[in-house]
Image: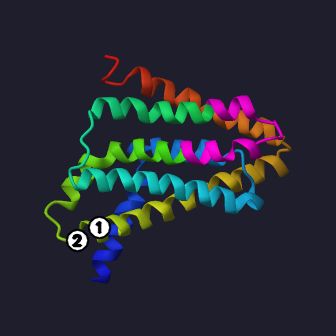
Amino acid sequence: MLENFWFNVQYGMNHVLDPNGYDHVLFLMVLAVPYVFKDWKRILLLVSMFTLGHTLSLVLAAYGVVNVNAALVEFLIPVTILITALYNVFTAGKKDKANSIGLLFFATLFFGLIHGLGFAREFKMFAGQSENKLELLIEFALGIELAQIIVVFVVLFLGFLFQTLFRFSKRDWVMVLSAVVVGLVIPMITGSDLLN
């Protein structure tokens, strides 16, 4: 039983940390880059909203409630990353982010739904005819959450290093990392099956 639990948690962690499917990591990078360690509650809540959205999509797919065009979802995933990165670029250095926090939580939940749909088909195969799909989903979601916390910690730690050791301003750090991510996702968008 514990073996199955750990296997499912690891499966969730591997989904996030898979080097071949780095879109999840890119999204987490642009989600976390505007924050520092003292903002840990807010970023943990954002990450949890993303996990919730992701898991909701998997629940809907696992129980056959929703079936979405895979090419459309594969196009939308990098679009969500691009939107988040561009939001960072245009708001970097601006003080008044408190007003937009509700919108940010809603957008993160919505983007989590889209990212979850991208994994729905594989998850349905993984779950198969399992009697305990809900238990499997919870264990998988726990793995996703753990992996996301690891990625966010790395982003916050790199931000701390660049801002203290290399004297980057917070604004410059947010701009540079977000611009790098924009450069990585544009080919993902233009190369999608939906556009070709």
**How far apart, in angstroms, are the residues tagged by discs 2 and 1?**
5 Å
Amino acid type at image mark 1: Leu
Which residue is rendered at x = 50% and y = 24% of the image?
186
Is residue 165 visible in the rendered structure shown here? no
Q: Which residue is mark 2?
A: 132
The answer to whether residue 10 of the structure is visible from this angle is yes
Quarter of the image with the C terminus in it: top left
Image quadrant assignment for residue 130: bottom left
Seen from the viewer's position, the closer of residues 89 and 172 is 89
Left or right, 8 with respect to 26, comes to left
Task: Please tell me which residue lies in front, 143 or 160.
Answer: 143
Identify the colour scheme used: rainbow
- Residue pictured at 81% horizontal, 41% vertical: 96
Which label was assigned to residue 134? Answer: 1
Residue 154 in the image: above or below residue 146: above
User: From the image, which quarter does the N terminus lie in?
Assistant: bottom left
The segment highlighted magenta reads 86-107
Whether residue 36 is situated above or below residue 79 in the rendered picture: below
- Please say if 74 is above or below 27: above
Give yes or no for residue 194 being in the magenta stretch: no
Question: Is the magenta region chiefly helix, strand or loop?
Answer: helix
- Give how far across and how far down residue 83 sits, in percent: 57, 31
Query: Residue 132, relative to residue 164: is it above or below?
Result: below
Q: Are marks 2 and 1 in contact (CB under 8 Å)?
A: yes
What residue appears at the point 70 percent right and 30 percent down from the top-left corner? 89
Question: Horizontal and vertical percent for residue 146?
Answer: 50, 65
Task: Depth check: give the residue in front, 123 or 191.
Answer: 123
Secondary structure at badge 1 equals: helix
